[in-house]
Image (spheres, helix red, strand yellow):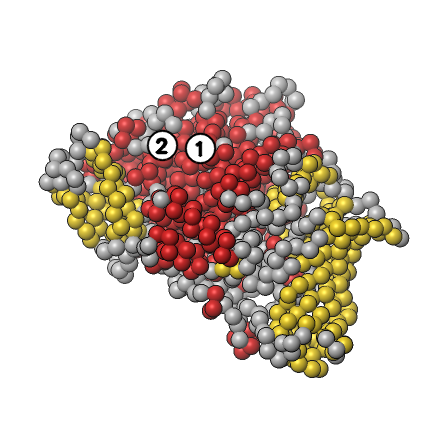
Amino acid sequence: MFSVAAMRSQVFCFVLGLLLVFGIGVSSAQESPSPTKEDSGQTASAADSSIRLDNTIAPIFEEIDLKLDPEQTSYTGTVHIHLKAKQARDSFQLHAEGMEFKNVELEGPTGMIPVSFKMRDDKRVDFKAAAALEPTGEYTLSIDFAQEFDTTARGLYRLVTDGKAYLFTQFEAIDARQAFPCYDEPSFKIPWQMMISVPEGQKVFTNTPIEHESTKDGWRTVSFAVTKPMPSYLLALAAGPLETTEIPGLGVPGRVITVAGKSGLVGEAVRMAPPLLKALEKYFEEPYPYAKLDLVAVPEFWAGAMENVGFITFRETVLLLDPKEDTIAQKRSMASTMTHEMAHMWFGDKVTMDWWDDLWLNESFATWLGNKITDRVFPEYSIAVTNVGRVEGAMATDAQQSARAIRQPVTDEVQLLQAADGLTYQKGMAVLGMFENWMGEDLFRKTILTYIKENAWGNAVAADLWSSMSEASGVDVGTAMSTFLDQPGVPLLSVSDLGDGKIALHQERFRNYAARSNKMAQSWQLPVVLRYSDGDQVRTLRTLLSSRDETLDLPTKGKLEWIHPNDDERGYYHWDVDPEILDRLSKDAVEIMNPRERVAFVGQVSALLDAGRLDGGSYLKVIANLADDPRPEVISAMTGAMAKVRIAFVTPELEDAFAVYVSKMLGPARERFGLKPKQGESDAAALLRPSLIGWLGKYAHDEEVVAYAKSVTEAYLDGQGTPDPSVLGQCMQIAALDGGWRLYNKYKKGFEEAKVPAERARFLAGLGWFTEPAMIHHALYYSLHGDLRPQEIFTIPMGIGRSGDQENTKILWDWMTNNYDELMKKMPPMFAVYMPYFAGGCSADRIEAARLFFAQDGPHYVAGQEKELDKVAEAVGDCVGLREREGKTVREYLIHVAGL
């Protein structure tokens, strides 16, 4: 519950800020079977009560003609939607939100048909024709409309940066309907054609290449090529005084597109894109499937990135790097994000989910394959090792009683948003990887290629993929997979040594301590790979554990020296072993476990603490055994464990003891890796150093580190020298801790004048680390009233929430409740469902206040909030319970280590 993977959907990026403030996972409770494509059609009566449109009269092609001027606040357009009827009917619906229809016409095979329409409150429009639309003909619905540009970075929205106005789009999941009338569901996968007029001198781009253009009366009209079949949520456009940089070596035309003045920051993106795309083409055994590939840097963007067909949009901070001060962390983020979105061009775009209940499959696959390809092309980033920690974060979410099945029916818009969480990405990724490991890489890949070929340019459901896998492997993969996808929770595999070469395996649902009384039986078809030693030889054993209990004979009669229950940590399960074996694993971790396993080991013992299977003092001793680990990735995981200790146990009177503990835990790593880069060091060492400096400076109060941080900050602000950009942000945060108004105002000015996205982010984050109450309140005021972009609103609160002062979480709660209405005006309204996360932390009193604030009969309630509040309450209860249960042993250990 103390780490959340980076996510790319617009809702994820919003929630991520709140999660990082309060250390809470995201999930929701619901179970479901796996439907087939035949289940997806909606009858007329069902459509009236469902989130889905009736498909009796459906589009086969849509032309969109827009007249856009970024300097204005509104626009006009016309759509021509070509329709076919499956059976005779005189009424139908489509989506449109907040726009005014100026004229509506319906033309059929024999001429014009009178048609009336009615706007509904649920973002739909009812149409009634004077005559039935017959299956034998094709019809064209033409609508002239007017609409305001959005200003909260959704739909078709307007933004101003450096005095210049631009237009961008973000349509996933249901915001294409805000830009123009359409059938805004993934199952309506059709060709589209855009014709866009902009003021002469402006540029405009969309999913396909330009076919032709003309200029008349000061307007430039551009007609774009017809798209391949695609759903509305994958359409995109950008307009304004944009700059482009060609990407050579893609095999298709490609560009990086930026706002004016930013094209000098695209060099790394231009370098990375070709080898990543080529590696994906090799995996899929076919060329990239679209006519072009543009990478678009967007200044205001809730999402991290979005897989629009041939037109991938990115948050500026992901895609644009200053070559003078880019960091390994930034490059790794760019590479993994870029590969994730490119993988979607096949899995998600070429083959599209039929409905949003299979969103998990889109995102799980792109995450799994994106990481796999990134690790092949750029192995120096250690993606395969570091991503284990993200899976551990998903398991922490999945351990909650309120955890949901990652595959569930989506029947309303709130569910659609709540289905987009860390489980969708990280649990799904881990489950796919587990079954790949079980089936074998070559066979697993063969099933993916078959699935893509059989469903190309159409829609599919998860059952189609399971069918391909089962046919290829001869095993009922769908049934085995469903035990992980259609029920919530993470398995716990307990392994006991029975002696004489026998071991007992037992599986049950892993539960945190407070939920141990819940005895509801659950089991999985669990692919298990054990690695063990009898003292003479290390062996592996594979089994598919389909019952709750099983006894295995190991192929040796010797003594069991040790056993690792999850070889290479490819299985999605927690595990527990006899105490003496756990002790052996921790003491001899480097000799017994590989780096991936050692990173996961940190998460495993943290889970045992949460479950009450390991006491607090023993937990700290086990973690301490890893302090000398030579791999930076393991030390990074260890700091995550220390964060758990700090949040749950470190009250003001323990801060001094905890400071000594941090210093001792990270002392060996400091000596090994140092505060400054070393010639020839690994990228993993460079990735660890910011965290190392941050922990030693913020929580160990290391005088040398603090002095170094202040000197780096001062030199940077004065324009003296070239500080290591990888640690600059951390140094600025440390300097802010006891900084005064003079430094505060320098950060504020630096933020307002920054031209490089990373520099802007660095200054803004620094404003959240000043500790004087007056500065904290001023910074929070600035979050709402300064010149911040929508996605930047929570940057300062994130810093305040993670500054180590538990009182600050109360300050943030008060800030949110006092400014609730103003916050709601600055973000898409659907995000209001996640505001209960401000009640997170370790305070039961704040949960009670939250229940009053978000009461269902009160002014702050929106549908779905109660589910999110229940999750927050459970996480807070776990934290409070952990503190009460293990606080004494942790206190004794810290005081002993500190010699106090």
Residue that mark 1 sits on:
382
* Residue at the image point whose x is 42% and y is 60% from the top: 463
Spot occupied by residue 848 in the image (x, y as percentages of width and height): 43, 57
Using the rendered view, name the quadrant where residue 640 is placed: top left
Spot occupied by residue 44 in the image (x, y as percentages of width and height): 56, 77
* Residue at the image point whose x is 19% and y is 51% from the top: 550
Q: Left or right of 805: which side holds 288?
A: right
Q: Nearer the viewer, residue 225 or 143?
A: 225
Q: Left or right of 61: which side holds 712?
A: left
Residue 471 in view, yes or no: yes
How many other residues sit within 10 Å of disc 2, few (<14), some (14-19) or many (≥20)? Answer: many
Looking at marks 2 and 1 on the same chain, the residue that comes earlier in the sequence is marked by 1
Q: Nearer the viewer, residue 660 or 483?
A: 483
Residue that mark 2 sits on:
595
The answer to whether the residue labelled 2 contacts the one labelled 1, judged by CB atoms less than 8 Å apart, is yes
* Residue at the image point whose x is 28% and y is 43% from the top: 529
Distance between mark 2 and mark 1 Cα atoms: 10 Å
